[in-house]
Image: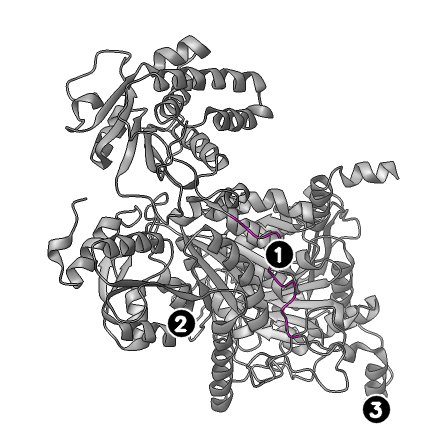
Amino acid sequence: MTSNAKTDIQIAICGSAGDGTIAAGDILKQAMAKAGYNVIAFDVYPPEIRGFGKCVARARITSEQVYSLKGKSDCLISLDDSHAIPHVRELRKYGAAIYEDTPMSDMAEGMHISGHLEPGHLPYGVPMREMSERITSSGRSRNIVAVGYLAGLYDMPAAVFHEVIGEKFARKSPELGASVRSAFDAGFEAGAGSFRLHFDRIGAPGSAGRHVDLIMMSGNQALVRGCLDAGIDTFFGYPITPATTIMEMLAREMPKHGGRLLQTEDEISAISAAIGASYAGARAATATSGPGLALMSEMMGLGAMAEVPMVAFVSQRGGPSTGMPTKTEQSDLNLAVYGVAGDGQRIVLAPTNVEGCWKCAGKAFEMAERYQTPVIVLLDLYLSNRYEAVELPDENPFASDCSKWAERDSRARPYSRYRITDDGVSPRAIPGNPGNMHTVTGLEHNEQGRPNDQPATHQEMSAKRHRKLLPALHHPGITIEKRFGDAGKVDVGILGWGSTFGEILEAMFEAHKLGVSCAAMKVVMLSPLPVDPINAFMDDCDAVLVPELNYEGQFAALVTGATGRAVNRLNRVTGTPMNVHDIVTEICRLAGRTDSIAAE
Amino acid sequence: MKDIQEPVYLEDKLKEIEQSGKLAYRSQTLPTWCPGCGYFSIVEGVSKAMTELDLKQEETVCVSGIGCASRFPFFMNTYGFHSLHGRALPVATGIKIANDDLTVVVLGGDGDAFAIGGAHIPHAARRNVDITYVVFDNGVYGLTKGQTSPTSVLGFKTTTTPYLNMDEPLNPLMMLLSYGASWVGQAYAGEPHHLTDMIKQAIAHRGFSYLHVLSPCVTFDKTSKTYQNLGMAVRPLPATHDASNFAAAMAAAQEIDLPQLGVYFARERPTLCDGLTEITARAQGGSAGQRAAAG
């Protein structure tokens, strides 16, 4: 059934809202993960609830670990030709196109996808609607017929699909599940029986054994898991795409563990309640996107000045302003790192993959408590909604209490909440601790916390608040920067952050194949910035490239500002993940290898 | 005419104050209010009320926003959170949710509450968060040196309304009643004994208590809400007022020019934390009600 060849197949399913595009992609990726393959998947949604906007579900199925989707897909499934036709260019040469070959009515010239396929594309017309109606008495299982056809065509194991379909419908409606399964089987039979070229078969899953423990998780799901593992006590949030699902998942899970969640009236209220709960000693967090973070910036300043722990998860989307709510971007770095009135530096973490979302989420609570400061975890829509097969350890790596506590009941010596210490962290007391009463404030204050605007006070307190963050660069149990690829001197070094790092790694591998010496460095902690490792990396590179999904080159400016060294920028604001080929082209150009740019 | 009283000697009075225990609630920081400010009555009232209720300082949190009134927490020897302009209510909600054994008192002025903070009031009230909200209404922005507030009267002249205020003031009592606050009362800084009693009742009430305190700003309002004008205008709610009657409370609240003092409305209903506790019980299998019935 499966050959020994390595697997690397990417499927793109295009349809209109309501066609079951996303559901089909979901079944495909869950099944393939169950079968032991590595899967990276990302769906694209329209911003409206109703209407006929375009949905695209993409899944890349591999035997070895990969880090991003490919620029070209190996198979294109069309559930709605008007949406799929623009994606024909995405299908590689000799890729397969699966489409409806018995449309309901006469179509105008140029409206059917078959007229748009390029030479080399393999056409597989399937009477999806007819089959769906015949098997299930309704056209609504067209998407399942298509997935079945795909599975049969590529010799995928049908059993895992049966399992996933069974689980999906087990609670709601087993009869519907049986009918869906029949639709899948009909498609599978048709696909298995069709003519295909010999390389159109799925290869083996990856190295055996390890993958049994992999589960498909999205960035948001991993983040939620990190919160729960870190013992989150309270959560306050306001719905905003793409962070809403974080609150929804926590709303179901937290009460089971005695946690308390409240949907507040706005983002300002959410962050205010989080800081209040933190002040009272609870592990508290909120989750939002760029526009929400903008509203929260005043409170971030209060957190910094009053030295109260706070955790905010921010999933970036197209901006500025309301922007593109269902498209990805990386343009809130400036807001996260700098966005506050005054010198209100805080800790900012930006994971690069789904497992990183879990790790950064849990560590955020540790750091917020330890350094008594706001911590922002910066994701983006792509990472929030990207599914990867991940393996999380059984043991919980997060510490449940990282606070430096004041002695209880220091009535003998008046308690100074903001006592200046060597490491800048003052021993903390919370309501309930006898004898340590104090008021926290956003006004500049002396060690006792009393408002004080004298020159020496503000100078010393500013130094204290900044100095205390530096040990975060060495916080245990988290990798805040890492270098990959060629060691020593290289022609081109790529500095990246966030979800784009997946595409950066893939581009680096391509560059290696073209004989370009190339290394990549991911930076996970954006504030405070690990300047020494970045300088060391830049010392090794003839040219440094910073690809990122924003127009203004925000991370490039951050690096240049901190190091005083110029970098080459690659900026894209298409609302889609960075194109690997674009990065490769730039690498080759910087390495002086314009001859080596491979055709896409 | 008040009864002629015996002379009061300073040493005796100081001893009485010390023995009352209310000083334990005061910090060593001197208030930043102008001499004659009505807020001195309020801090006195809060200290006395806490003494009489025997609240533990370490289990009491005073939360405020920004403004003259919001400086309050610094003058108290309890835990305190001097937060941001208009945001005291959600901060207090977070504190209460994290630890509902704490007594949380929220304090602020009319600007902090009704201008920038207005959006948070409906939600704190309708959720019945078990906190006490004391708003010090002097109808002006004092800390920024004399601008109109949402409770300034029509025609009030300030630095930003040199041609006189054209905005109708809002009616805080009607607002709080309509948002579902489960305890609503009004007091006056010029009647400190009544004020202390109101504060005590407000804190003791289980649920969201709103106490509106009329208080003159002696520096920036020489014409409108002065001791002279308020002293003549205020009167108690009639003895026949039924605090369980919502319509009666709304009717009484409309007398904004002749403010009536006392408890307008009071009722018991489940608090926010009661609801969260119930949610936890449901999530962990079975509701609290079922479990209680099962014994």
Residue name at image x 41 percent, y 15 percent: A186
Residue pointed to by mark 1: A396
Amino acid at circle 1: Asn
The foreground one among A486 and B106 is A486
| A144 in the magenta segment | no
Residue pointed to by mark 2: A529
- A213 left or right of A439? left
Q: Position of residue B85 (x, y in %)?
A: 52, 66
Q: In this view of the protein, can residue B161 be seen by the observer?
A: no
Residue A348 got which mark? none
Tell which subunit mark 3 falls on: B
Q: Are marks 1 and 3 on the same chain?
A: no
SS for callout 2: loop
SS for callout 3: helix
Q: Are marks 3 and 2 on the same chain?
A: no
Tell which subunit mark 1 falls on: A
Residue name at image x 43 percent, y 12 percent: A138
Residue B71, placed above or below residue B167: below
Start-end of magenta stretch: A391-404
